[in-house]
Amino acid sequence: MIKKIVLLFLLPIFVYAINEADVDKGQTYYKFILYEKLNISGEEFTKLYTQKQWRELFSNNSKKFKEKFSNNRQMKEFMKTAKFEEIVPYLKAFTIYYAKDSNVVAQCEE
């Protein structure tokens, strides 16, 4: 019984920690991969849209995201790679966490 109670108290902490890791990874991927292609700071990038809009952009295999950012040649080429597909979940977590309607301020060092 005590184990179950302890688990109930610790579970939210683990879920939060996992999400934070995804956000941090997304921020790192943006800083070292996407920044050089888009040439806008991570804070400016995440503040382009609300959380709901970011979710829509990343839905359906990031179809709308790819359409929105395909006008940049470097970005268009990168979005065709397997590396892009690998980092999408982290970018999604990063953009939603720091979105325009979020109360969190990004701490990007660029």
Image (tube, rainbow, N blue to C red):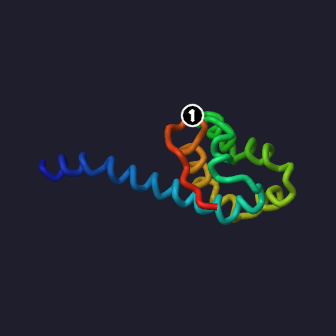
Asked whether 97 or 18 is in front, the reply is: 97
Image point (79%, 48%), residue name: 69
The residue at which mark 1 appears reads as 101
Check the image and report above or below for 49 versus 2.
Answer: above
Image point (63%, 59%), residue name: 87
Check the image and report above or below for 48 versus 79.
Answer: above
Asked whether 75 or 3 is in front, the reply is: 75
Q: Look at label 1 and name its amino acid.
A: Asp
Q: Residues within 10 Å of mark 1 (few under 14, many from 20)?
A: some
Query: Which quarter of the image is occupied by the C terminus?
Result: bottom right
Image point (75%, 62%), residue name: 36
Please state the horizontal and vertical placement of residue 15, each as a whole percent of the image: 38, 50
96 displayed left or right of 3:
right
107 displayed left or right of 62:
left
Please state the horizontal and vertical placement of residue 82, each as a whole percent of the image: 71, 64
Q: Secondary structure at mark 1?
A: loop
87 displayed left or right of 19:
right
Q: Residue furthest left?
A: 1
Among the 4 quarters of the image, the one containing residue 46? top right
Image point (76%, 56%), residue name: 39
Please state the horizontal and vertical placement of residue 73, each as a whole percent of the image: 87, 57
